[in-house]
Image (spheres, rainbow, N blue to C red):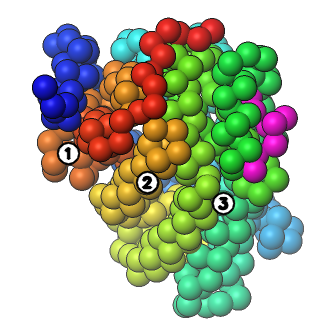
Amino acid sequence: MAFNPAQATAQYIDALGPAALAKAAAYTHGSHWIMLWGLVVAALVTLIVVRTRILERVSARLSNRGWALRTWCIATLFFFLSALLNLPWDIYSGWARETSYGRSSQPLADYLVQGAIAAAIFAVLGGLFFLGIYALIRRAGRRWWIWSGALAAFAISALMLAAPIVIEPLFNSYQPVPNGPVRDALIVMADEADIPHDRIFMFDGSRQSNNFTANVSGVLGSARIAISDVAMGQASLDEVRAVTGHEIGHYVLGHIWRGIGVFALLAIVFFFLADRLYPRAARIFGSDTAIGDPVGLPILLFLVSVLGTGALPVINTLTRISESEADAYSLHTVNLPDALSTALVKTAEYRYPRPGAVEEFLFYDHPSVERRVRTAMEWKAAHPAPQAADPAPTP
């Protein structure tokens, strides 16, 4: 009997069972609403900060300081205030909800400590970035937004270079993958991508999430392979190879650099529109500040957030293209379609595998699991694997 990709795909998805599929649908649909309600929370935070005029008072106290120091302090203070005002919402959306769905077992105290560290890093770096933005407004005048793309590209490149070395170890422990079949397989794959053997890690991703994850992060000399202990504990050797092949595909195909380019272009578009919309938005929030005044940062950021949410269908489409290309890279180089499919099905617990076309277009930053498994099964039909996938979990 001829192999049927559609039937094989249905079997993979149906194997989850009705209860698991219903739970995944509820979690995924709720996540869409969480994102939209987040804009309402952002509007409330903006309104509180603007109406209390706390940034104006800080600006007045720093009036005798240099412009750069005053601007950085105002921006950094706002990011701290925003994190504090958002805390109840963050606890619900980032911890309570995740815990209730079994997506995380992180204690609340640990979540709060790590959130505080993240907020401090974001406040300092965000303050530096917007110091650059306000410097552009001062120097370039009405066409400041044209140069914002270059600043955004530099900022995201620097962050990607530093994150694996400086930032990510603050949140997780990274250890070399133990000697054995998994490490041996990863070494071969790392050689194909020119990633040094001493940058193949396993990290305690279970500290924050029970999700099945792996990644190849960093740029230039900071690139590394990192596999969550969740994946290491749940995956077979072939699943590790298939998923790592996907992640290496992102690296080899230059998706990082493509993403930086897209991010830079979006920054230009968003800041151009924010520049035009700012006066009206300021009036709505009850502010008379000009866009070049750092006191108006809450309004500028809210506009960028709204524009970013509106652009999600475009952003998600570009991301889905990259994910499909990475899947294809894994299939071409590793040729383990069944292992890739079983690994993908494990992500369906937090990403409903059968969304409608409109839902997928609007909200999904990955192709649906069903679509990705179908592609793998079509590849299997055209390119039989040299050997069957190893079903035995590898510790």
Name the residue: 24% across, 52% down: 361
Nearer the camera: disc 3 or disc 2: 2
Classify residue 11 by image quadrant.
top left
Q: Closer to the N terminus: mark 1 or mark 2?
A: 2
Q: Secondary structure at mark 1?
A: helix
Name the residue: 15% across, 31% down: 2
Span of residues in magenta: 194-205
Dots 1, 2 in contact, CB < 8 A: no
Mark 3 residue type? Ile
Query: In 3D space, how far apart are the residues under numbered discs 1 and 3 (Cα atoms)?
Result: 29 Å
Of 58 and 364, the residue lying toward us: 364
Kindly identify which numbered label has been placed on residue 359.
1
Would you call the spot at circle 1 few (<14 residues within 10 Å), some (14-19), or many (20 or more)?
Answer: few
For residue 55, side relative to residue 277 (left or right): right
Residue on which disc 3 sits:
156
Quadrant (top left/top right/bottom left/bottom right) for the N terminus: top left
Query: In 3D space, how far apart are the residues under numbered discs 1 and 2 (Cα atoms)?
Result: 21 Å
Whether residue 104 appears in magenta in the rendering, the answer is no
Residue on which disc 2 sits:
325
Mark 2 residue type? Glu
How many numbered tags mark residues here?
A: 3
Mark 1 residue type? Glu
